[in-house]
Image (cartoon, rainbow, N blue to C red):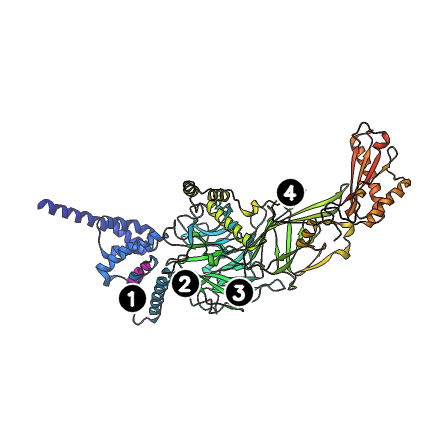
Amino acid sequence: MMRFFIGITLVLFFTGVYAQGDLATADKYFKLKSYDKALPLFEDAVSNGVDDPMIHYKLAYCYTEQDATADKLKAIPHFEKALAGAGNYLPADTPMLLGELYHRNGQLNDARAHYANYRKTIKSNQKLINEIDRRLAMIDNAEKLMKQPLDTKIKNLGSIINSPLTEYNPVVATDESVMAYTSLRPNDGKNRSGEKYIEEIKISYNHAGNWSQPEVIDVASDYNVGTAGISPDGQHMLIFIGGAEGTGDLYFLHKTGNGWSDPEPLDSRINSKYRETTGSMTPDGKTIYFASDRPQGLGGLDIYRSDLLPSGEWSAPVNLGPSVNTPYDEDAPFIHPDKWTLFFTSDGHNSMGGRDIFVSRLFNEEWTTPENMGYPINTTFDDNYFTLSADGRKGYFASDRVGGQGGQDLYSIDMPEEESNIPLTMIKGRIFNRETGEPLATTIYMIDVESGKKLDFVYQPDPATGKYLIVLPPSKNYDMVIESEGFLPYTLNINVPGQTYFYELFQQISLEPIRQFDVTVGQRVEVRNAFYDSHEEAVADQKKTHEAKLIHSGDVDVYELMNDLIAAGDEEAIDYLLELINTEHPIEQVNFREDPRLEVAVRYFYYDESDESKFEQKNVGDKTVFSLPSVPVTEVAKRQLNEKDVPATIDPNVLNVTEKIYFLVDKSNLDPKYSASLNDILKLLKEHDELGIQISGYASSEGNEDYNRELSNKRAIAVLEYFNHKGVVRRRIVARGYGETKDDKSSAEESRRVEVKVILLEGHARISAP
């Protein structure tokens, strides 16, 4: 008995000593709001037997101030112990805090009970009563939505992207090739922000369904910087740069060869002395939706719209009104490339709790009542910053739900089938110099031909790769006016089909200078389009591409699936799985030489045929571009496909006609005696536009090689100029000097010759006059 009493005394003694020492330090940190320092001391106290209700309360409160959701939820049992032991001595809002935690954790009945208990204590505070009633309504919303879960799969983007801290606001290019996002890092004290963490922008690239190691985009600022939006092609980024006293504005970053430009502030009509946080632009660059807490809103952050004026300035922003905005915060607008589907984040409307993702659609210039995106996209945690791929199949968002790696994490979602087919055409192309294989510095102007709009949007392909991405609505006819460095402007006419499904067009444009004797006399433009020409084919190939992404990203256990198929003896399924494994990213997969879906159009432009009267005047904004004649790609491709054979109007024997012209030693003067035979060829050319001539010049082996090549060139040029002066344009002439004759058996006279051969112009329809 005495031994037991001594044991009790020792426990009380050591507990008292602990409480009087470290607890005093913990209380000091708690009063200074240094919760990170107070937390481990309170944890040690409780683990050593301290059971004081106020200690449990303070420990619980320290947990609520942690970044990770899992740490916040550790507060629940300690708040419960505090309320059970000293409810009357705790802060009055303790039941509210506990109700919030139960609410976030999906323990809705417990949350409802604690909210109700708290409501009974605040009978005279109508504002708090309204807030409690709103939260009780959120619980009802959560119960309703959780009973009807969506058939979808949500995936954490993993440790390559997410960290133990916070990642949020993913902005993703339309084709999912690039993603930028905001990431928190500890404040190093080298800026004016006094916050514990500061923001930075990171960027990652998609390789066969896997995101690359993120890189930091360095933006010089004394305050927070974060992602705000991105253009559909990933070439331009909207970012937020904070200011003093909680303000902040939107800025543009533009892709350069090896990085990003310095920030450019948006128009002063969009940026204000208040706070503009996020934004999203339509694919044509004419409309921006953004969030701001400027006065005269409906409360908190509201979403506004501004349109680009012909002057190049933005119109006065218009609040989207009470159908979208509420007295609470509406943030992170994302306007889909279809230009009428708007996603945004809100802690108003019929939220399940915290921030939820909503969608509204523009019909007859009115926004529909926002719809909650449903469970499990939304949960009782904070779910926000949503973006969607152009085909509607893949979404990205941020959430602090349980199971993440820290605070908020980034997630992807396979959208429900009924939501994942959007009738748009996405053109993914590349433009390059055919001679060198290198990308060309290019500007592309899109003009809506049928509506008469002067300028739809200006696209600038990635200078490092030549790749571009354009999203267009169905049933449209566009002129692509293209300016490439070193070439005259030209125009491609593109017809977008009136499809009811998502449609991808892969495009390759190659340019090549046409030279005759080192003089550039024209340019060759080749367009290769690979596209889906039926709904069934489009759906099948998109399904395959989507399934291939799942394989590459690790969403499917390939080895387990393969073992199951082998065990079942399903050879057809095994072959399909192997095909998926070998499927690459679509733009890299397209064989622009042999793909059966290829549409190929080639046009040769010769400058001696392109006088000012032949140029087309294109009005693009406040700029006028004089373009070579338009190339109706589909029409030209079909015509060229059907005109590969010798036309019936031409005698095949004509193609055997060859005339030899001989020159004196060391001379390049054309002897007039050959005029008659050359005129016979000239007559054929005038009778048949499909015919041309090939001129080949030679020299004897006397003298050095360079001299002989120059002499052979001069002889060929003499014959070329004869025909050229007679009205035969360079488009119909192929001419080259070959230097000294290599045939040792040929006579001296034979080595000093020019041969003129009648030819059928290669793909004669392809090089006919525009």
Circle 4 sits in a helix, a strand or a loop, which is it?
A: loop
Query: Mark 4 belongs to which amino acid?
Result: Gly
Q: Name the residue under label 3.
A: 305
Q: In which quarter of the image is residue 753?
A: top right
Q: What secondary structure is the stretch in magenta mostly built from?
A: helix
Q: Mark 4 points at which residue?
A: 437
CA–CA distance in space, label 3 to label 1 = 40 Å
Question: Does 97 lie within the magenta span?
Answer: yes
Q: Mark 1 points at which residue?
A: 116
Circle 3 sits in a helix, a strand or a loop, which is it?
A: strand
> Is any atom of residue 486 visible in this view?
no
Q: In which quarter of the image is residue 439?
A: top right
Q: Nearer the viewer, residue 628 or 569?
A: 569
Of the two numbered discs 4 and 1 in the rendering, the one whose residue sits closer to the viewer: 4
CA–CA distance in space, label 4 to label 1 = 70 Å
Q: Which of 190 and 10 is in front in this view?
A: 10
**Among numbered discs 3 and 4, the one appearing first in the sequence:** 3
Q: Taking 396 as reference, is 718 left or right? A: right
Labels 2 and 3 touching (C-beta < 8 A)? no
The residue segment tinted magenta is 95-102
Q: Mark 2 points at which residue?
A: 347
**Among numbered discs 2 and 3, the one appearing first in the sequence:** 3
CA–CA distance in space, label 2 to label 3 = 20 Å
Toward the right, the furthest residue is 673
Circle 2 sits in a helix, a strand or a loop, which is it?
A: loop
Q: Taking 424 as reference, is 87 left or right? A: left
Toward the left, the furthest residue is 1
